[in-house]
Image: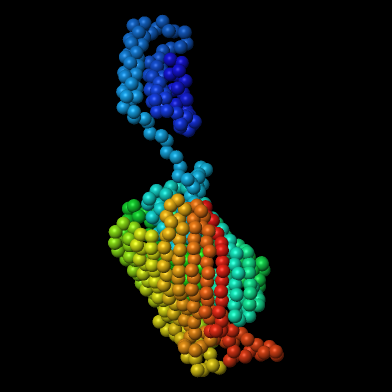
Amino acid sequence: MRIGLRTRFDGKAAGTAIRAEHREAEPRRAVRRGKCASIGAAVLIAFAPLPWSGAADAQPLEILIERLDRLERENWQLREEIDALKASGVAPAKPAVAPRGTGESGHVRLNSAHGYAVLDPTAGINRKQRLILDRKRRGNLAPDSVHVHGAVTAVANYQTSNRADKFGYLMRHPTASNQVGKEVSEAAIHSAQLGFTAPLGDWIVGHAAMLFDPEQSFGAGTNTDLERNQVQVRRAYVLFGDLARAPLFASLGKMAVPFGLTDTVNPFTASTVWHAFGGLANGATVGYAGERLNLTAMAVQGGSQFRAANAPVKGTDVPSRLNNFALDANYTVRLGKDRTFLAGASYLHGSAYCQHFPIAHFMPCGDNNPAYDVYGRLVLDDLTLKGEFAQTLDVWPGTFNPDMPRFRASKVTSFDIGARYRLVSDPAPFDLSAEFSRFVAGPDGAPWEKQDQFVVGAAWFARPSVKLFAEYTRVHGFVPLNFMSGGSIRDADGKVMADRTISDASARSNVFLVGVNAAF
């Protein structure tokens, strides 16, 4: 009975610890320990009413003997059950073990799979709300907890250009402040992210992500200047929805604008469609998240927003009205196991391409310039094909330079087509990819007519959340958005030469790049 009593207390007060300590014990020992605990419990029940204060004679001896007989019978029954379990080979289930890459401390948790997906800048760029809700529905995000995630992307590259100081590679802002001469090289942090996803109950989620990106910061100076080395809150919103109950959701805050697909098959380099039309703004989003049909509408804050959205407010860039909006609809057809076809279309009421000459990004516009986008993605087992086309409905007024009247104003267009093939699936996936994309902002023959980008890449996942990659990129043309049609070149006396432009259709750049994206 001493064994029974000790097992009773150990099993009751520290059962979890015992199971963890003896997880490797053979099934028979685990069964025996559980049965002994039951015997101990029965002994305690039997003797619970006994007055241990010295009045034992008050308890009739016959009752005590009867209880002992009953315990003996139960003990024999338990032994028979143990013998039966031994004969059948059935063992108690082992306690659940947390999946690799998942950790928790109280209500703070780490999940590297979620961290990689929610911070991935190449996939699901404007669909992170749906990703969060899907993971919550599948039980990957426990309620009333905070899931902390982060990612670091480091790169090393060598670039050449046939025009001094003109490198058209868009993964770092193409300015002479950072790229001098015809050959450049670097080893640097491209970006670092830190954020959290906090499911609060069944239908509310708080999400935010901070970003450090000196390579693509809009700050002035070199990439070591303090203005370019600031940490910003890239996304921050409250998300409402429980897809287990209804396929509806809403979000309020700073988020990606639901316009187009804007994803890429490249392991690192973004498509020019994202560079041209990938929006980021304050606003409110509502959506329908079906198994096949998905609908999203966003009321976008007016004025000049953080990225690729601008709707003037009384001729200014002041964001004092909710007067811009975006709509997206897409449908997924399932063609079999691991085979899908996605098709979609989007509309943005106020794109970024509305300024007059000379062009300076984020400046006020006379009127809004809408844009539309159509896209598709085909997945056939290990092969992924994608294509996208986006264009403004009206011409961009600033693409007409009155001092170069032979080049008329032009609409802004961008498109891409790409393919990715998973050469190796397990245990460490290995992908090969190729993508062509184009940005068009001027008529034929204009120095700012277009910029083409062709990328071939390879990616190896050393771990599910660690991607090592290599890319070769070829860029034709040099078309920076600011002053693309002229207005920035000055003579020796400081006077603007309006008939000159920094854009150069004959520029050619080559980029050889390796890097790693590590997330948790």
Q: Residue at x 42, y 70 (%)?
A: 418
Residue shown at 45% from the left, 66% from the top: 433
- 69, 503: nearer the viewer: 503
Q: Is residue 504 left or right of residue 387?
A: right
How many numbered dots are placed on residues in this image?
0
Quadrant hosting residue 420: bottom left
Horizontal and vertical percent for residue 40? 41, 19
In x, y percent, where is residue 118?
A: 47, 58
Q: Is residue 464 left or right of residue 293?
A: right
Which residue is found at the position 53% from the left and 81% from the top? 477
Q: Which residue is at the front of the view, 188 or 357?
A: 188
Can residue 227 be seen in this snapshot?
Answer: no
Left or right side of 463 for 158: right
Quadrant position of the N terminus in the picture: top left
Residue 398 is situated, as x and y percent measured from the top left of the image, at 51, 85
Whether residue 29 is visible, yes or no, is yes
Q: How is the image coloured?
A: rainbow
Eyeballing the image, is 323 above or below 443?
A: above
Q: Quadrant of residue 64?
A: top left
